[in-house]
């Protein structure tokens, strides 16, 4: 499998609004669009564009958010995951598994509307890694 483009860096935050204020002040940056809820993923999301990628601000949503425990340990928030694109999600999943990495659950629809899965940080040098199928129009 060929490693694709860095789609986004996920940044966990207790407050998307406060984080946006920080990006405005420090970088004169505005959000790509309004924040939105992804209940199936247990997060509220907002993107900030960079010239070559995106920052994905993620705030916990609901009682079982995967970000809640991270924020307990890191109350200010912090870098949570990196997301790389691949051309075919099922081939990528099979290859990670064949290499002995723990894929966390099944592939599911992510914030960009294509399938994503996560690889356990302990099998990726301490980095929670999201793998995302490249949107068809971008191929
Ligand atoms: C917006 C949708 C989507 C998109 O399309 O972009 C998203 O990005 S959603 C993002 C949120 N979703 C997820 O994170 C799903 C995958 N995550 C998980 O399944 C779990 O959070 C986890 C990674 C398996 C962690 O398990 P958990 O039980 O929650 O926490 P622990 O504290 O027990 O963690 C075990 C171990 O791993 C270390 N850890 C946890 N999170 C991270 C992290 N983000 N980066 C690096 N390391 C992490 C944690 O510190 C523990 O290590 P030890 O303390 O050494 O045991
Ligand atoms: Co993400």
Image (cartoon, rainbow, N blue to C red):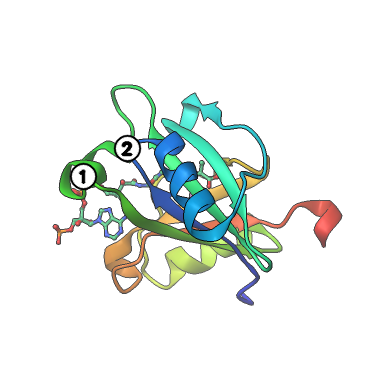
Q: Residue sitting at 21 percent across and 44 percent down?
A: 75
Q: Residue sitting at 41 percent across and 58 percent down?
A: 81
The answer to which image quadrant residue 17 occupies is: top left
Along the line of sight, which residue is nearer the eye, 65 or 86? 65
Q: Residue sitting at 47 percent across and 67 percent down?
A: 96
- Disc ID at residue 67: none
Q: Secondary structure at mark 2?
A: loop
Is there CB contact under 8 Å for labels 1 and 2? yes
Q: Residue sitting at 37 percent across and 66 percent down?
A: 101
Q: Position of residue 122 (x, y in %)?
A: 26, 65
Residue 117 visible, this angle: no
- Disc ID at residue 75: 1
Looking at the image, tell me whether mark 1 or mark 2 is earlier in sequence order.
2
Along the line of sight, which residue is nearer the eye, 107 or 125? 125
Residue 25 visible, this angle: yes
Q: Position of residue 103 (x, y in %)?
A: 41, 55
Please state, as top left, top right, bottom left or bottom right, where the N terminus lies in the image: bottom right
Q: Position of residue 119 (x, y in %)?
A: 40, 59
The 10 Å Cα crowd at callout 2, few under 14, some 14 to 19, many 20 or more, is many
Image height of 10 relative to 2, above or below: above
Q: Which residue is mark 2?
A: 14
């Amino acid at each position: 499998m060929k490693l694709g483009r860095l789609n986004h860096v996920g940044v966990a935050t207790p407050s998307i609004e406060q984080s946006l204020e920080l990006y405005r002040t420090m970088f004169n940056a505005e959000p790509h669009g309004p924040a939105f809820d992804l209940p199936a993923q247990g997060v509220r999301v907002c993107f900030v564009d960079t010239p070559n990628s995106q920052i994905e601000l993620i705030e916990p949503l609901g009682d079982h958010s995967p970000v809640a425990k991270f924020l307990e340990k890191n109350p200010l928030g912090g870098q949570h995951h990196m997301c790389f694109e691949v051309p075919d999600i099922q081939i990528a999943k099979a290859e990670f598994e064949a290499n002995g990495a723990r894929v966390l659950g099944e592939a599911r629809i992510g914030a960009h509307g294509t399938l994503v899965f996560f690889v356990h940080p302990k099998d990726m040098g301490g980095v929670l890694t999201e793998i995302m199928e490249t949107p068809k129009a971008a191929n």
